[in-house]
Structure formats: structure tokens, C-alpha cells
Image: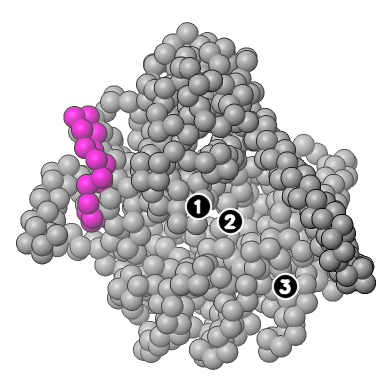
Amino acid sequence: MGEGFKSFYQNVLNERLSELLPTQLREKYEPVSCLSGGESSEVYLVRRRFDGQKAVLRVAMSGAGGSAQIERQILDRLDHPAIPKALDALTEDGREYLVREYMEGQTLGAYVKAHGPLQETEIMDIAIGLCDVLSYIHARQPPIIHRDIKPENIVIDLDGHVKLIDFGIARTWREQAQSDTVAIGSRPYMAPEQFGGAQTDARTDLFSLGVVMIFMATRDSDRTNLAHRFPHGRLLPVVQKCVKVDPAARYQSAAQLKKAMLRIRRRTLTRILIAAGSVVAVTLLVAVALRLGDEGGFARGYAAGYQAGVECGQAEGEKRGYDAGYDQRLDELIQARAQGMDDNAVRFFSGVSYQGNSSGNLINDGLAVEAGDYICYATATQIYRMTLDGKRESLVCNHEGKALNYHNGYLYHLGKRGWVYRALVDGSECVPIVQHHIDDLMVDGDKLYMTNSEDGRKLYRCNLDGSGFEKVSDVEDMFYPSIGNGYLYFGHLSDKDRYLARLPLDALDSEPEKLDNPEANWINVVGDNVFYAAHNVAPETRFITSGIVRLNVNGTERARIMGDMLSYMNVTRYGIFAFSGPDKGRLHKISLDGSQDDLLVDAKVGYVNVAGGWVFYINRDDKEALYRVRVDGTDNQRLG
């Protein structure tokens, strides 16, 4: 494609979106390409100006099937790696605008078109992945029904993971409803109840998934004459049950459908093993008959193979036994804690977000925290601790952990089944603090503070053991909260902008005090100062600029210490650690007064947390692996 055409295309694209988009969206996003267009809706790939994140923008005429605001509300209830997050939603001048996270990969429709009909194992892999996503959305309270499961809304990423996009016509299931208000969906994949007469539910999405499985096997969505057209005999009864006209005759949940496919997979593996065993038996008989075997060698080989099998089986058995024992013990602890506590003291978690960390180390996954004489950090599967010099390591928890916090000898973290804490000294087991929809967890004094996404991101508080759970503020939309000097600092979203505000911890039921006007992001409290990234729009150019602002905790002595575009920022006593859009995600260390800016890590960085003189970061150039490096840039090491 010539440069002249590229320039012409970009000019046309810019001109089109300048006509379509309201000012506040033009200021936030720049166009990249047009993905699709029609009479009632258009879809564009855009890039967020302040950090370069790709996003999908859908513009539709109001009433053209789906509401941007409703879809935003639904996506805000979901927190799953296979589901995009909503970034913006707006209704203006008869148009609906929705901006959501862009999911890298290829649609299933394009994948099948490029590769042809898929094999049985590949169909089951994709369908099982979708079952996991559907189980998640159907388990919300109340359940969410997608209603538009089709190849164009299923994305396969470079690692083969399945993503589900386009919740534009998704709905919340209502117990008393008799039918959906309108017949809506993509006709070849729609269940009979979507045409009216009954309410759609989880079984509706399973019908559509059955048709998708037909498409994967035949490159066609035709449901007729499957006995002759569908090529995979073992999978045929499963697909036929999915597409039954009567919902009661289908699988009743995505978990049931997944179980049926796993049963087929196990039977297939058993047949392979039996067949292989028969070949081995025949081979041995021939060998014995021909006297070509060495009896001593056979005995030694048999013994070695037997021992290897025992060790392999024992390792796998220990892993499964640990998982089962962990789940059972946690259930026992939860039940024990629930007894003798009032109904408001325990909240069962659902859709927990992985944001949240202690003050000064608040942003992103919270993978590391300074814990007394140790540093605790979390890999993808375990939590470890090391001494401050980085030399000695030991296992703390043999399960995943995020949002690590530390207080008075205890490690607070998001574990396998919810929020828990664990004593670091005596090695006792994790004790659950089971909360509902926690977004941020902060420890201060003898209290835990958290925001609750199910309740408009309002502030809640409880004791260190999880008891005394209560709502302490009716202020909504608390973003990037951080505690310091007796106050809670946060970005407060009003009707017009998001500004820096604070509430005193001893009067959280009061009105928030406004400290600064610019949109405040990545808020960190360090000593007597609040650091945050401020995004401003120049009225003459409408260009978004971003920079670091340092503000006295009382709102005085404001100083803009950096003016570059920033993606993320983490401020500690060691300095400011940030990575910017122009530098393609490379990690910089900036002095607290902004006078010095050094490149710390020459790699594309994902999340960054600072603890005890070390920087822990996700390396996107190395398959999202966890790394550590000293704050002076030395001893860069891969952790897992």
C-alpha cells in the first residue's frame, strides 16, 4: 500500500470521525482504521491518546439494537481476561457511542475461513474455552445472557486462548419475565426463544454455541441433516443436544456441556492408550518368540520405567490432592467464620477485580510488597518471600496471589478463592476475609478499607480479621484511592471531569474536599505530598497532554514536575517509576523533583510494583514473565 494512499485514507478517516464523534471522545481517542460499516452502525479501531492503548469504537443510531449505556453497565459487572473492558459510553444527538478494550487476535470466522473445517480436538478446545466464559457470565447475580454467540464475536489470540466480544445485545436475566422485549440476534445462530414467546436464558447461549460448533466442523451454520453432514461422530450427540428446539432438552448449563466434552476427550485418550498397549503387547510377544530380547535389559528397563511412572503419578497426585485439600479447608474456614458473625460481617466474593495494593504501591496487580524484614512477591502460581538483599527465598503460599498488602506480621492478599491473610512468622494457613466485589484493598491502623464496584465504587471498611464489615461513605466513583496522613485521597468523577479529592478517615461520611482540578490518575501519597498523573486538553489544539503533578497533601504548593505522556506511574521513597507512550512502554526512573529521568528497563513493561529497594515488573517482551531489578537498575533477573 503506497504512502500516498495511506495518507489519503487517514485524512478521510479523520474527517469522518470528526463529524461523528462528540468533542470529549475526539479529545481522548485518535482513529486507526475502520473495521466495519453499515446503515445503522459503524465500528472503528482507535488509539487512546494518553497511553496508546488500542480500543474498539462502535457508533450506532439510537434504537438500532443495543444501548451503549446498558452494554457499559453489563461490562462493568464483568472482570474476566476473556471479556473486554468498557472504556467509555455516551449517547448524544441520536447516536450511541461505546469504546471498549481491543482484544488482539483473529475472529473464529476468519480463522475457519483461513484453516478450513477444524478437527474434533480443536473444536472441543475452543468450545470448552467458551464454556468457561459462559459459566462466568451466567453465574453473575443476576445472570447475564450474551444472546449473540457467533464466529464473528469469538476471538482466538496468538496463544490459542478464546475471547468473547460484543455484548451489545446482552441482557440481564429477570426472574419474573415471560419473554424478551424484542427478537434480536444473528439469525443463523439464534435459538427459537429469541424469536419471541419465551425469555432467553443460559440455555439460549448454549444453543448458539452448538451452531458455532457445527460451523467449525463444516464451515456452515446449517443445522439440518446433521447425522450425515457433521463429520465427528463422537461429538455429534453433544451438538445435537445443544440445538434442541426445546430448552429443557438441551444442556442446562455451560458446566454440563463442558463435562460432556471432557468425557469424550477421556474416552478418546483411553482408546489411544488401549491401542498403544495392544501394539506393545504384540511387539513383546514377537520379541520373546524370536528370542531377540535381553531378559536382564528388559528387567532393568521395566524397573526404571515403573519407578519413573510412580514418581510422575505421585507428583500429579500431590498437586491434585493439594488443590482439593486447599478448597476443602478454605470452605471449612469460611463456614467456621460465618458462625457467630452477623449477616453483614461476611460478603461472599464474585467477580473480584485484581486492582488494589497498599498506599504508595497501589497501581495494577500489586505483585510485591515490603513485609518487615522480607519482600513478598507473587508469580503466576505461588507467593514467595525473600530477604531485602534479594538472596534468600522461601515459599509462602502455594497458590496464586495478587494485590499483596502487609500489616503487623500478616500478609493480606487476593488468593485462589478470595481475600485472605496469613501470618508470615509461624507459617500458619491462609485465613479468609470473604468480601463482595472488592476493587481496592488498603490497610491503615486496625482497619481494612476497600471500594465496592457493585455499589458504585463506594467505600467500605472492616476490622483486620474481616469482621465489622460496613459501608462508610456514600460518595461514588472513587478511583485510584490512596491513604496517607489521616486522609483518603482519590480521583472523584463528577458530571464534567475527574478531579483530585480527599476525605478524612475520621469523618468519611462528609462531603469530599476538592484539592485540584485536572483529571487525576495513578494517585500516590508519599510523605507530605500527593503525586498523580494529570491529563489536560489544550483548548486551541484539542490535544491531550499528560504529566506528573506534585501537590502538598493539603492542596497547596502545586508543582508540575514532568510533562510527558504517561501510561502508568508508581511513586515511592525511591523515586517515580513510570512508562510512557512515546517510549513504547520502557520503564523510567524519575527523581521526586523531576530533575532526573533515567531509563531503568529497556523492555516493554506491563505492571510495575516497588518494594524494599527492588522494582518488580511484568515483561511483555518475555511472555508476561515476572522480573525484578534493583532501583538503581542493577541485578535484573527473571523470576517466573
- The answer to whether one can see residue 475 in this image is no
> Residue tagged by mark 3?
384
Give the structural element (helix, strand or loop) at label 1.
loop
Residue 29 sits inside the magenta stretch: yes
Task: Please report contact status of discs 1 and 3: CB closer than 8 Å, yes or no.
Answer: no
| Residue 498 image position (x, y, % from top left) | 38, 55
The mark nearer the N terminus, 1 or 2, is: 1
Q: Residue at x 47, y 69 (%)?
A: 620
Give the structural element (helix, strand or loop) at label 2.
loop
| Main secondary structure found in the magenta portion | strand
The mark nearer the N terminus, 1 or 3, is: 1
Q: Residue at x 85, y 42 (%)?
A: 335
Residue closest to the eye, 332 or 496: 332
> Residue tagged by mark 2?
354
Please name the amino acid that badge 3 sits on.
Answer: Tyr
Image position of 400 (left or right of 211): right
Residue closest to the eye, 46 or 141: 46
> Residue tagged by mark 1?
160
40 is higher (above) or lower (below) than 431: above
455 is higher (above) or lower (below) than 507: above
Residue closest to the eye, 154 or 220: 220
Residue closest to the far top:
197
The mark nearer the N terminus, 2 or 3, is: 2
Measured Cα–Cα span from mark 1 to mark 2: 23 Å
Q: Marks 2 and 3: which is nearer the front? A: 3
